[in-house]
Amino acid sequence: MRKKKGSGLPVKTTVLLGLSVGCLTFSAVGSTRAALSYYSETYSARIDMQSIGVTLVENDRDVSYRDYTHADDEWDEATGTLFTGILREGEAWKPGEVHREELGAKNSGNIDEYVRIKVYKYWVDQNGRKVTELSPALICLEMPGNGWIIDEKASTAKLREGDDRDGEMVIAYYSAVLAPGESTLPFTETISVDGGIAEKVTETVETGEDGRTTITTTYDYNGVNFMLEVEVDAVQTHNAVSAIRSAWGVDVEVAEDGSLSLRN
Amino acid sequence: MRQSTKTALTAAIALGLVAGISVDSANAYFTSYAIARGGHPIQLQDRVVTEIREEFSQWTKHISLVNTGDAECWVRVKVFAGSIYETVFSGSQHWSPGEDGYWYYDEILAPGGVTEILDVKIILPDGGVDEFGNKLSYKEDFNVVVVQECTSVRYGADGTPYADWNAVLDHNSDRYEWEEGGTGDA
């Protein structure tokens, strides 16, 4: 029998093409399951409804949020300011006095998520420049736990009495899955500036030509601002271990009930 | 020859597509974040200074303190006299004795404010008797010294004001030295 010229693809080519299509199909499915990132135009109609969002909450008030809006790369977002309304008009912040400062996160998206919080505390001068000589440990936050796991290794701030560290940052992970609309328990409950700052002084000694010595005492913390900077981060719960490692750079374990723990 | 070109081309296209998909999926986790910051200024420059006002009549010192500084403060006084001179305190109910010998004023003194009067009556010892047995007045010179102190108002966790009379300044300097004949000996 004479082979007909141009009647179809050779067997080898057909097999190779089939294998390629197979590879392509499994790759697409695999990455969709793993990352929910690759989808065809037809599939996008379904996955597009899944939106992540997170809101920083202070004393039951939504301060800042960033929510995906179902549109391509469009985010509904706002950034607010902490401590608004804590003091009355004209009232000064009194060192030693404790104020309510409940900081937490709310799931403002429509998919389950894990959240973490990063709190930075520091001092700035009247021009807004950071004053690194002053102690962040004198900005006191009460952190009762409430389901948050503090990453002791990554945190640099003083976490408890006897802790010699005096860095700026505390980082903690909320162990439970946060469902849409749910809020975490507060990571912090109160804030105060240590009353001991009134005893931190610098003395300069000057001796005049007449031999008299003048000692000038200035408060180290006079005129500076204490600052708190807070960031809440959210990540999908699907394929959480990989997602958290990729997004946050930490290794975690996820229990059967979904609770998160840090891997040492 | 044409067949192997086709094969190679097909394989290359498939590989390219697979590679392209893999790159996308590596960056595809759903994440979000929200940030805020805030702070408040701290003012400690207020001067805490008080001065004593003292009048003397009928062997009684009438003591009051005036806040000449810029900030609210707590005040206390202590009276020193020789052991043979008895002192009797009276006056305003705002003054009360502490276990340390100081008398404490129970109200915060605002800038420009003046305390109510604390009276300190000095009981003199007997001056003896003359050769006729008559009582003599006490004639010796003596001093009764009143020391007044003030301290800035501190606040407890619930905002309640209090005084810390044991507060010690934490000097951020090692240049401080007492010098003979200097301020330290004054």
Image (cartoon, coloured by chain):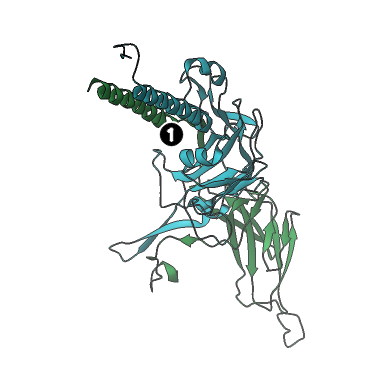
What color does chain B have in the rendering? green
In the picture, measured across the screen, residue A216 lies left or right of residue A263, that is left
| Classed neighbour count for the residue bearing mark 1: other residues with Cα under 10 Å, few (<14), some (14–19), many (≥20) | some
Q: Amino acid at mark 1?
A: Ala
- Chain that bears disc 1: B
Can residue A100 be seen here? The reply is yes
Residue drawn at x 54%, y 62% as measured from the top left: B168
Q: Residue B83 location, x and y as percent? A: 67, 78
Question: Which quarter of the figure is the N terminus of chain B placed in?
Answer: top left
Q: Secondary structure at mark 1?
A: loop
Residue drawn at x 52%, y 42% as measured from the top left: A118
Viewer-closest of A40 and A4: A4
Viewer-closest of B134 and B153: B153
Viewer-closest of A222 and B74: A222
Q: Residue B93 location, x and y as percent? A: 76, 54
Question: Which quarter of the figure is the C terminus of chain B placed in?
Answer: bottom left
Query: Within the image, what quadrant is residue A110 found in?
Result: top right
Viewer-closest of B70 and A80: A80
Q: Which residue is mark 1?
A: B26
Q: Residue furthest toward the bottom? A: B131
Q: Residue B23 location, x and y as percent? A: 39, 31
Can residue B42 be seen here? The reply is no
Kindly indicate which chain is depicted in cyan in the rendered structure: A
